[in-house]
Amino acid sequence: MNYAENILGTIGHTPLVKLNKVVKGIDALVLAKVETFNPGNSTKDRMALKMVEDAEADGRLKPGGTIIEGTSGNTGMGLALAAIVKGYKCIFVITDKQSKEKMDILRAVGAKVIVCPTDVEPTDPRSYYSVSKRLSTEIPNSWYVNQYDNPSNALAHYQQTGPEIWEQTDGKVTHFVVGVGTGGTISGIGKYLKEQNPNVKVWGIDTYGSVFKKYHETGIFDENEIYSYITEGIGEDILPKNVDFSVIDGFTKVTDKDAAVYTRKIALEEGIFVGNSAGACVKGLHQLKEHFGPNDVVVVLFHDSGSRYVGKMFNDDWMRERGFLEEEITKAEDVIKD
Ligand code: PMP
């Protein structure tokens, strides 16, 4: 018989899939690491389990404890799966920018979800950083995960995702491109790949409204770079400890509209139903295309599932209200032709 002991045993070993139409015009082999295949439908299952296991090992998380985290949803899902199997409670603090689907999904796996305003300073007592920290001091036998600064986050990708990409490409990967939020994914995978081959180039995808690109290029933390944006999961108004700028060769910023449009294109042109940051990554690949050549093997990581965005990028009214729909279907013959 071949079965997993529990759902946590199905994390990892996700497929690498060649992108065909959506990367037309890019002169390289482009392969997507489709992390939707994890049981919680995102790459975050890997680091969530690793953070829980490491906290259990050194006593930060004790039997019957409560896991507290500020999470945009995907990390919460991974933590909730680990908590169910291992017998912990979960409280997740999330911002009002996150999709309703993400909140509903977290509640479906037994977590208590607290919603905080997006447009406040990280140091404001109402911010999701501040609320999660405060709750962890007030609730007995609780553990504040802090995925931004928790080294187990990047370590999970260094130990699992990086080696998977190296093996799946037979060591031929030349570039790695991924969206950056906490920095765990880019830093762990980037470090591993560069240790195998220092010539591998690592590019981060950033958003307009985030500090990463400017900081990487100038060393300046410029508050003028910070404003609200729509793209979920990537970009920050802080510098998380998990972003290891030394393994990142460069950043490119992608607009909210381009990220949304490309998220839909990936579904329509490749049949890969993935989330908003994947759209940002594919548009980012086009912006970076002069860095790639015909012998290059470019790996791009798709973080999460499109199902979390059905009320947003995959909803025509939502797209139209923001001026994101490329073209309207107005003529009857167009509808009939389809
Ligand atoms: N995409 C999505 C959808 C995410 O949830 C996250 C995590 N914030 C990222 C990209 C960025 O990953 P990381 O936090 O490892 O930098």
Image: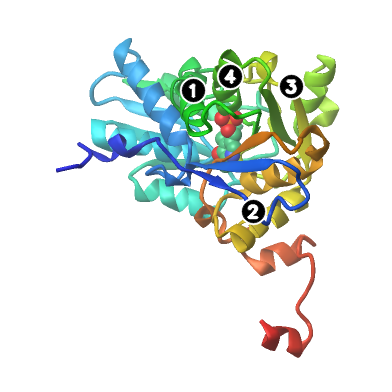
Q: CA distance from mark 4 to mark 1?
A: 7 Å
The disc labelled 2 sits on which kind of residue? Asn
Cβ(mark 3) to ligand 1 < 8 Å?
no
**SS type, badge 1:** helix
Q: Quadrant of ligand 1?
A: top right
Q: Which residue is nearer to you in this view: 273 or 21?
A: 21
Q: Which residue is mark 4?
A: 242
Q: Amino acid at mark 4?
A: Asn
217 left or right of 15 in image? right
Q: Nearer the viewer, mark 2 or mark 1?
A: 2
Residue labelled with disc 3: 249
Which sits earlier in the primary sequence, circle 3 or circle 4?
4
In this rendering, does residue 183 appear at all?
A: yes
Q: Is residue 304 above or below residue 20?
A: above
User: Which residue type carries mark 3?
Assistant: Asp
Do residues under tags 4 and 1 come within 8 Å of each other at their CB atoms?
yes
Rendered-image quadrant of the N terminus: top left
- Residue located beneath label 2 in the image: 20
How far apart are labels 3 and 4 at the CA level? 16 Å
Q: Quadrant of residue 263?
A: bottom right
210 or 280: nearer the viewer:
280
Query: How far, Cα to Cα, is label 2 from label 1?
Result: 31 Å
The mark found on residue 153 in the picture is 1
Q: Earlier in the sequence, mark 4 or mark 1?
A: 1
Q: Is mark 1 within 8 Å of ligand 1?
A: yes
Which tag is nearer the camera, tag 2 or tag 3?
A: 2
